[in-house]
Amino acid sequence: MIDRQHLAILREVNRRGSVTAAAEKLNVSQSALSHTIAKFEERHGVKIWTKTGKGLRLTQTGEYLLTVAERLLPQIEHAERIVKDFSVGRRGALRVGMECHPCQRWLTRIATPYLTRWPDVDFDVRTAFRFDGVAALLGYEIDLLITPDPLDVAELLFTPVFDYELVLMVQQDHPLAQRVFIQPEDLVDQELITVPVTLERLDIYTRFLVPANCRPRRHRTAETVDLMLQLVSAGRGVTVLPDWLLQEEGAGMPIKAISLGENGIRKSINVGLRRGDEEISFLKGFLELAQEASRSAA
């Protein structure tokens, strides 16, 4: 019989790299943990791991059970949390993950009215899942994903809730400031400031610069939108952000927005759910509120 204890041991040994550390995390003795796995191996006639020097190496059986643990344990833990919420009068728990820095600013539009409408729902924002949100959603580590880059995944449903344009932002006295739009080659002598993610996650590269075989003179990163706007305002570089962020966060700053290419780069913020969850009341309520906010901003 495979039970939760066996899966939890495998997950913690894999995460922490040793039986000793896993036992400490699970609040059991090392000998008790080892005995539990030994009994499992004897009952099923398999080996879970083998020792390699001071470390452990999972066998094929161990690797398979680890994938089961990583898939099932988050669902069980989430179910336990929901049941606990019900027991104390809460309707449920909404865990929101985000895949972009500007998404955090957009979420502030929704959070306050949502908390007001759904006072009996525990609301948690998981920024730790930035840029790996689809896996977190599929793995039941979050319940809802906010992303500008939805994927075509059969198990997930993405709904666009807010349209915007990605624009180049420059200081108002910058040589490019009088342009209606720019071409990729206009950035080859510029210092480009972006959020700290891989180039594969930056539309300015994947949809604008790379197809034209162009690169900026220098690429640097900044941790916050506020800092990016301040650097641009001081003439320390140029950046690419959603147009609405300039209107809301950069109001009064000496910054000009310019389209990327003659047709611009259009994007949408999307809300992603697991298929089958869209009728859960407090998840459906979030999506409806996001759509209402989009209509009122239009």
Image (cartoon, rainbow, N blue to C red):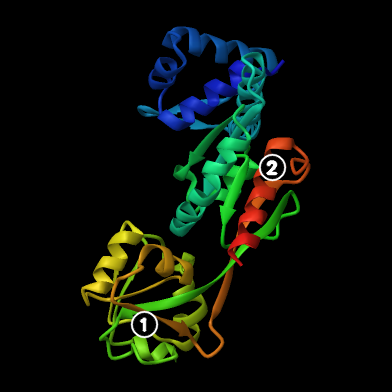
> How dense is the environment of label 1, judged by Cα within 10 Å: few (below 14), some, or many (20 and up)?
many
Disc 2 on helix, strand or loop? helix
Instruction: Give the labeled residue for mark 1.
Output: 215
Image-quadrant location for residue 94: top right
- 150, 45: nearer the viewer: 150
Image-quadrant location for residue 158: bottom right
Residue 226, x across and y down, in percent: 31, 60
Query: Of the numbered discs in the image, which one, if any, rests on residue 30?
Result: none
Image-quadrant location for residue 199: bottom left
Instruction: Give the amino acid type for the residue marked by disc 2 in the picture.
Output: Gly
Where the N terminus falls, by quadrant? top right
Whether the residues at callouts 2 and 1 have beta carbons within 8 Å, the answer is: no
Can you see residue 50? no
Residue at 33% over, 89% down: 176
Instruction: Give the labeled residue for mark 2.
Output: 285
Residue 55, x across and y down, in percent: 39, 29
Residue at 45% over, 44% down: 127
- 88, 82: nearer the viewer: 88
User: Vertically, is 180 above or below 138?
Assistant: below
- 148, 178: nearer the viewer: 178
Instruction: Give the amino acid type for the residue marked by disc 1 in the picture.
Output: Arg
Asked whether, in this view, residue 256 is left or right of residue 262, the answer is left
